[in-house]
Image (tube, grey):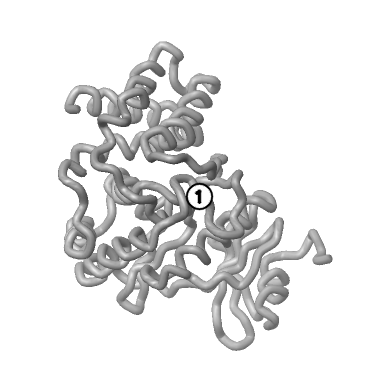
Amino acid sequence: MHNSFEGPSAAAARFTGLPATGERRHSGALTEVTLDDGRVVMVKRGDGDRAAQAEAAGLRWLADAGTVRIPAVHGHDGQWLVTDRVATGRPGPAAAERLGRELAALHATGAPAFGAPPPGGPEDAYIGLAPMRNVTGPDWPRWYAEYRVLPYLRRAVDDGTLRGTEAPVIEQVCERLPELAGPAEPPARLHGDLWNGNVLWGADGHAWLIDPAAHGGHRETDLAMLHLFGCPHLNRILDGYQQTAPLADGWTERIALHQLFPLLVHAVLFGSAYGDQALTAARTILRTC
């Protein structure tokens, strides 16, 4: 048994087998630890067994695809997750286009089903600090409504972030999902929380992905999240993606549909401004589709 009061350096040493020689705090949960062979690892304090387990399983599942660069996992337990540190540089158009090609290849490696968790990952996982259930479904529209939109809509209403009278706008989108979803797609291997902050532009000229909420889903969802919060050289990312695995016609009109999930998660975590954005997205979908 490890000491429940151990710090990041002790956790890094336990999982890597190497003594730690220094540490630098990044945030309340994240610490950079230097090992005595000169390597640097990131040590993240988890919020419980399932959070670290889910993130570690997601990182390994994405890495197993052999496409996008993913930091190696050294180990995890109920308190800590230890991974390699990514030495960062500046975003560039060539790295962005390469990321698009690699992301298309990642998605194409697939998943057993919509909602499938990574191997070894828990059914009850997380996206950021919000609970996220990885429960499988036979088709994307029904699964997306039941497990990715409606749970967060209900919680936002319960918390007072959205008014009950506003919920029907989003519920109407869910009812119409079979006709709004576009051509059927096979389950893709998703990062699941692909906003700009989880894309690290490496000093090696490659983009690296961190902090996944990985699961089987629709590939347009990852791309919609990149659009939602912006990303350097996004057009070059999309060019690389389209060259490798062209998206179905009308995908740009479906961006708002795929953004409902992350917007409602943010409404639950951060308040009514995101609830208003979710309502705007829902009204846009109903007006244009």
Q: Tell me residue 168's x, y (percent).
A: 38, 16
- The answer to whether 215 is drawn above or below residue 34 in the figure is above
Toward the front, the furthest residue is 138
State the quadrant of the N terminus. Answer: bottom right
Horizontal side of residue 40 vs 203, given as left or right:
right
Toward the bottom, the furthest residue is 37
Q: Quadrant of residue 86?
A: bottom left
Identified at 32% across, 39% down, the residue is 258
| Crowding at mark 1 (Cα within 10 Å: few <14, some 14-19, many 20+) | many
Identified at 31% across, 31% down, the residue is 178
State the quadrant of the C terminus. Answer: top left
Identified at 76% across, 64% down, the residue is 6
Q: Tell me residue 94's x, y (percent).
A: 21, 71
Horizontal side of residue 123 vs 175, given as left or right:
right
In this view of the protein, which residue sits in the foreground, 177 or 84? Answer: 177
Specify the amino acid type for callout 1: Ala
In this view of the protein, which residue sits in the foreground, 43 or 246? Answer: 246
Horizontal side of residue 159 vs 175, given as left or right:
right
Q: Tell me residue 79's x, y (percent).
A: 70, 57
In this view of the protein, which residue sits in the foreground, 226 or 288? Answer: 288
Q: Quadrant of residue 52?
A: bottom right
Q: Tell me residue 107's x, y (percent).
A: 35, 58
Q: Tag 1's secondary structure?
A: loop
Identified at 39% across, 50% down, the residue is 187
Residue labelled with disc 1: 116
